[in-house]
Image: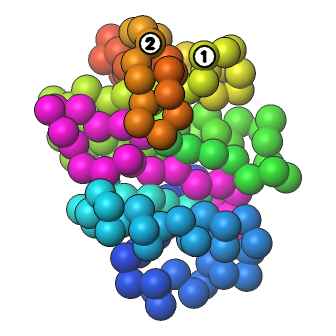
């Protein structure tokens, strides 16, 4: 799997616009980058399995703050249930560790067991409690456990 950057320069994202699911994602990024900044590698990415076929997306919710980075990811509808989300999450963790191994890597989910909680568990995350997210209200916060790094 390869992560392809979603650029701040919208003209560089034209190659993704043929895919309606990419277009939906691209529509939120200009405002998102204005709000949180554009600080590589802490940006958004599309995920491809063969260099052409885009199967999902993932990224970071801004640059690290207080030695923490938060990841988010999703699989496009036609690729759900195939391990794509698990691999996108894994790639984001690996990029985080490669960039700054001292960071805590976190993610947030709804307060229910679902595909995302399964993906996080498979990638060595553990639920550390309930937090109040400014966009989603009360959510579970998950943290990557470094002891599980060999599983990646």
In the rendering, which numbered label is found on residue 130? 2
The one nearer the camera, 85 or 30, is 30
Q: Could you tell me if the residues under marks 2 and 1 are in contact, i.e. CB atoms within 8 Å? A: yes
Direction from residue 99 to residue 126 in the image, left or right: right
Q: Which residue is drawn at 53% across and 65% down?
A: 28
Q: Percent x, y for residue 2?
A: 53, 59
The scheme the figure's colours follow is rainbow
Local SS, label 2: strand
Q: Residue 57 colored magenta?
A: yes
Outermost residue, bottom side: 11
Q: How far apart are marks 2 and 1 (CA)?
A: 8 Å
Q: Quadrant of residue 100?
A: top left
Q: In which quarter of the image is residue 5?
A: bottom left
Q: Percent x, y for residue 146?
A: 30, 17
Look at the picture and state if 92 lies above or below 102. Answer: below
Stretch in magenta: 48-71
Q: Quadrant of residue 142?
A: top left
Q: Residue at x 35, y 15 (%)?
A: 145
Which quadrant does the C terminus fall into? top left
In the rendering, which numbered label is found on residue 111? 1
In the rendering, which numbered label is found on residue 73? none
Q: Which residue is drawn at 38% across and 84% down?
A: 9
Numbered disc total: 2
Instruction: Choose the circle earlier in sequence order: 2 or 1.
Output: 1
Asked whether residue 88 appears in the rendered view, the answer is no
């Amino acid at each position: 799997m390869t992560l392809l950057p979603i650029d701040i320069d919208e003209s560089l994202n034209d190659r993704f616009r043929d895919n309606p699911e990419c277009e939906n994602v691209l529509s939120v990024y200009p405002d998102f980058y204005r709000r949180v900044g554009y600080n590589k590698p802490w940006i958004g990415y599309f995920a491809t399995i063969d260099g052409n076929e885009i199967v999902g997306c993932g990224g970071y919710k801004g640059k690290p703050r207080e030695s923490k980075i938060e990841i988010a990811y999703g699989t496009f509808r036609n690729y759900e249930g195939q391990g794509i989300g698990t691999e996108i999450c894994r790639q984001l963790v690996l990029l985080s560790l490669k960039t700054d191994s001292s960071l805590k890597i976190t993610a947030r989910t709804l307060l229910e067991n679902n595909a995302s909680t399964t993906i996080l568990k498979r990638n060595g995350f553990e639920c550390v409690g309930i937090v109040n997210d400014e966009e989603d209200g009360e959510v579970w916060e998950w943290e990557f456990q470094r002891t599980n790094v060999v599983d990646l």
